[in-house]
Amino acid sequence: MEKEGSATVKTPAIVLSIVFLLLVLGFFVFVFLYPNSPDAPQVQTKYEIYGGMTDELKNSELFEDLQSGRSVCFLGDSITAGTEINGIHWYDPLTPYIKGSISNLSTGGWMVQYLIEQATAIPNADIYVIAIGINDVIFRNAVKSAQTPEEFAQRCSLLADTIKGISPDAKLYFIAPWTFIGQSEDINDLGNSFRDALKDMCAGSGYQYINPDPVITSVIYAEGYDKYMYNDFHPNASEGVGLYSYAVLKAAVK
């Protein structure tokens, strides 16, 4: 009777232990198999530059600046803010080569006027990489869009003055408005006009100008839209952001 009673007492404890272990196991399975859950540890995915980091791509003032240890701030729209589910920035493949701190002020749908109005929120940095303009070109009827290439260049100049007020010794890189796939010939021509106006402004003011558009379009048309694009405006992960990072470095080569 004593042994029987002893077994009766132990059985519930064993069952509770098994249930507890199953709950713990279930938690870890959920966390690691479903990494997008709020309680899951965030795993940093590595995004590769298209074709790999070559000696040619390192031969640019931009790459030297990224390696300098100085702080870098990225400004822009949704392509800089990050697209798709987890927010993949176009420059993510470059981050292993950036030796200084990184900051970011960008939001989907922004035009250059929005950045001007966010002056108090722009972080202090040594280097600014500004990729803005695609929304100005495409959304012609928006209240805050630059209506002409000249107005776009003037607003970019005002943005540059604003940044210089925050960080007087900062170095500025302007990336030409990103490419847009599948748009009309009129929109493509307008985009080129905006790029040319920005290029002239940078040349006259001593800012760095980078136009990755020819590289991006040539690769996409040669290898296929679906491989690199999430939609007509946004690169996918990881092939698309790898291409965009490559195109920026390629266009900056000396």
Image: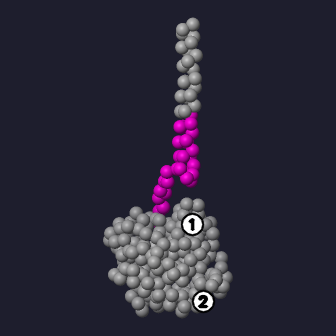
Q: In the drawing, does residue 137 fall left or right of residue 124?
A: right
Residue plotted at (41% across, 68% down): 102
Q: Which residue is mark 1?
A: 83
Q: Amino acid at mark 1?
A: Thr
Q: Position of residue 195 (x, y in %)?
A: 52, 85
Q: Secondary structure at mark 1?
A: loop
Q: Quadrant of residue 219?
A: bottom right
Q: Position of residue 248 (x, y in %)?
A: 46, 75
Q: Quadrant of residue 72?
A: bottom left
Q: Amino acid at mark 2?
A: Gln
Res. 97 in view: yes
Crowding at dot 2, Cα within 10 Å, few <14 / some 14-19 / many 20+, comes out as: some
Residue plotted at (52% across, 50% down): 40
Earlier along the polypeptide chain: callout 1 or callout 2?
1
**Residue 61 circle label:** none
Q: Which residues are magenta?
A: 22-50
Q: Position of residue 203 (x, y in %)?
A: 42, 89
Residue plotted at (63% across, 72% down): 232
Residue plotted at (39% across, 88% down): 206
Q: In the drawing, does residue 127 fall left or right of residue 216?
A: left
Residue 44 sits above or below residue 196 on the image: above
In the image, residue 149 lies in the stretch drawn in magenta: no
Q: Position of residue 103 (x, y in %)?
A: 43, 69
What is the quadrant of the C terminus in the image?
bottom left
For the residues labelled 1 and 2, the Cα–Cα distance comes to 26 Å
Res. 243 in view: no
Residue 162 sits above or below residue 95 on the image: below
Q: Which residue is mark 2?
A: 147
What is the quadrant of the N terminus in the image?
top right
Q: Nearer the viewer, residue 206 or 251?
A: 206
